[in-house]
Amino acid sequence: MTVVPLLSLRVGAVAPLGARGVPSGIAKSAVAGPLALSLTGFRGDEQGDTVRHGGPEKAVHHYPFEHYAAWARDLGAHPLLASPGAFGENISTTGLTEDTVAIGDVFALGTAVVEVSQGRQPCWKLNERFGRAEMARTVQSTGRTGWYYRVLQPGTVTPADRLMLLDRKAPEWTLARIWRAFYIDTLNREELAGIAALKPLAAGWQAHAARRLENNRVEDWTRRLTGST
């Protein structure tokens, strides 16, 4: 059984971000005590854009702390990489990555139960966060994206809690496999058909794969990655 302790439990209020001063909840602070986790996220956690961020399919954001060493090699010294929280994560761990975690993996987290719902599609707010125009694109191209959980059972989570694996509904569909299908081998129809039919996957991602199958083309990522209109 996989049991992984939390390194950090974090929430954040909406505040101006970067040179544009856009409203965002990406800057999250560590909490010292218990937090209620509802179907839509942790108490006290906010999103500046509730259309694209948050909600039941993005209730909890998990980012692996082991990626930070790779980012330090890529970016050089950066103050955000000194401790968890650089990527707007609610929870930070070592021992779980996109290569090992799959869609539909179910974990106990404190008294709550959560399920992996989708990977993170990086957006231009990471550029503002890091002060680097290509940061979102780099996150996407490396596959070091992190992922989201939906909440199956609300509960209470403390910084001393652990993620305990309870079930694997589709272990062959790792986050890394889906990332490769969306961003590397982008028109592999067999993979896209499998993703479109993957029931534990967030409905928006299933529809995304279905559109590619229907249109036989890859969508334009520019607006999401740069914020340009």
Image: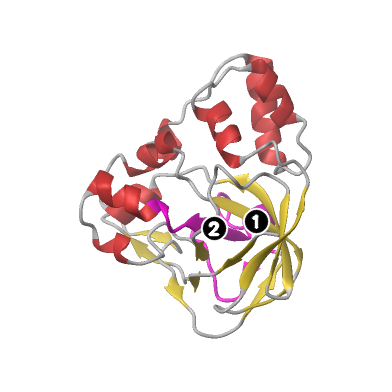
Kind of residue at disc 1: Tyr
In the rendered structure, the answer to whether residue 128 lies left or right of residue 170 reads left
- In the rendered image, the quadrant that contains the C terminus is top left
| Badge 2 vs badge 1, beta-carbon distance below 8 Å | yes
Q: Is residue 132 visible?
A: no
Looking at the image, which residue is at 53% across and 57% down? 95
Q: Secondary structure at mark 1?
A: strand
Q: Nearer the viewer, residue 163 or 19?
A: 163
Rendering coords of residue 36 (x, y %): 66, 78
Looking at the image, which residue is at 56% across and 16% down? 217
Residue 209 in the image: above or below residue 164: above
Kind of residue at disc 2: His
Q: Decide: few, some or many residues near mark 2? Use Cα within 10 Å; few <14, some 14-19, many ≥20.
A: many
Rendering coords of residue 213 (x, y %): 67, 18
Q: Which residues are magenta?
A: 40-67
In the rendered structure, the answer to whether residue 224 lies left or right of residue 176 reads left
Q: Is residue 103 visible?
A: yes
Looking at the image, which residue is at 45% across and 76% down? 30
Question: Taken as a whole, is the magenta stretch helix, strand or loop?
Answer: loop
Is-magenta flag for residue 46?
A: yes
Q: Residue 160 sits in which quadrant?
A: bottom right
Location of mark 1 (residue): 149
Rendering coords of residue 51 (x, y %): 58, 51
Is-magenta flag for residue 204?
A: no
Location of mark 2 (residue): 62
Q: Nearer the viewer, residue 159 or 42?
A: 159
Give the residue furthest to the front: 1
